[in-house]
Image (cartoon, grey):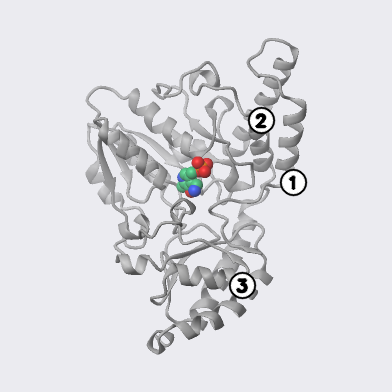
Amino acid sequence: MIYLDANATTPPSAAAVQAVAETLQAVWANPSSPHGPGQQARRVLGQARASVAQVLGCRPHDVVFTSGATEANHLALRGLLAAAPAGRSRLLVSAVEHAGLLRLVQALAGEGWRVEHLPVRPDGTADLAALAAGLGPDVALVSFMAANNETGVCMPVAEIAALAHAAGALFHTDATQCVGKQAFQFADSGADAATLSAHKFHGPKGVGALLLRPGTPFRAPVPGSQERGRRGGTENLPGIAGMAAALQGLGDLAAEAARQTALRDALEAGLCAALPATHIWARGAQRLPGTSLLRVGALSADVVLHRLERLGVAAASGAACASSGSEPSHVLRAMGVPADEALGAVRLSLGRTTTADEVRAVLAGLPPLLQPLLAPEALSA
Ligand code: PMP
């Protein structure tokens, strides 16, 4: 199988698997228990926290362990809004956020928060002028992802943070797709809060973190004594140890990013040459190294994915959570892409396991399967 769905999830690294297994077996006591085994679990938790903080450029106390990115996004938005000063009742979120976060803000709107969706430009990049125009003294929070899971477009997080802060608003970034693929240092990001999820960088599923700058007004939506009162519930210590091991094992991000970019660019160039009707979205924008979102003429995503499957390639028609639906991607719609074109979207997301041989196999195998399906004019478009 050729796995080209690394933005949906990644295989756990050997180090992550080992850390999970060892911790699950040997460090099963409750880290909040005062006895010896509990204290040992507490030490392991502290070591994992320090290790995560070291890789992500923050302090150990900034790290709030969660069950993944969805929960971290909930903690961030609900926790920061609940502590917002009176008079700040608006929430600005980008229109291309992950579906889970958009559903959350829909719920927040129903609870009385005034939600505004920030547009993106046709190439999927952030529209900073629209953000600046939307800010005002009544904005409590801006939430803008660091990199988009469908297009791979990277957002200027530090600039967004500066604009939000100049208006007295807090800034949260969903960095789920960025961490592990590109350098992300919380201290340099300017964000007050950032979300990450271990399974996107070869850690286990069901574990992640919210990085939260200390002193940021926050009222825990899931109260409890753990995580310094910021997230209740016994910590998932095996998962947390696995996440720390995965982060430590990432190594030289720049070298891996350059490798994946070269493979992705070769894949895109080869597909466009063999199938001139191929359209690649956000191709000119700064993107995550391995992400390619494309359509082939007017072929529907289902048709292309079916042929990919025949070749033994696992890919997606956009976000994994939305790929079973027949709705056009909200990300492409926000970029102004017509619904019929958006329904052709196929996401190829390369990762650390992707090889040059695999890219060659896709380039050799896919065009002959798709060419007969394309109208003659599309072949030469
Ligand atoms: N945010 C983004 C940008 C994502 O890509 C994902 C995963 N598809 C999530 C949030 C949700 O992550 P999790 O599976 O850890 O809840």
Identify the residue under disc 2.
48
Examine the rendered structure and indicate whether residue 244 appears above or below residue 132: above
Q: Nearer the viewer, mark 3 or mark 2?
A: 3
Q: Nearer the viewer, mark 1 or mark 2?
A: 1
Q: Nearer the viewer, mark 1 or mark 3?
A: 3
Direction top: furthest residue: 34
Q: Earlier in the sequence, mark 3 or mark 2?
A: 2
> What label sits on residue 311 in the rendered view?
3
> What label sits on residue 14 in the rendered view?
1
In the picture, measured across the screen, residue 322 lies left or right of residue 251, that is: left
In the picture, measured across the screen, residue 162 lies left or right of residue 225, that is: left
Marks 1 and 2 sit apart, C-alpha to C-alpha, by 17 Å
For this rendering, which residue is in front, 345 or 248?
A: 345
Q: Amino acid at mark 2?
A: Ala
Q: Earlier in the sequence, mark 1 or mark 3?
A: 1
Q: Earlier in the sequence, mark 1 or mark 2?
A: 1
Residue 142, picture quadrant: top left
Residue at x 48%, y 22% (from the top left corner): 230
In the picture, measured across the screen, residue 230 lies left or right of residue 130, that is: right
Residue 297 coordinates in the image, percent (x, y):
40, 77
Q: Amino acid at mark 3?
A: Leu
Marks 1 and 3 sit apart, C-alpha to C-alpha, by 28 Å
Residue 15 coordinates in the image, percent (x, y):
74, 43
Examine the rendered structure and indicate whether residue 127 appears above or below residue 51: below
Q: Are marks 1 and 3 in contact (CB under 8 Å)?
A: no
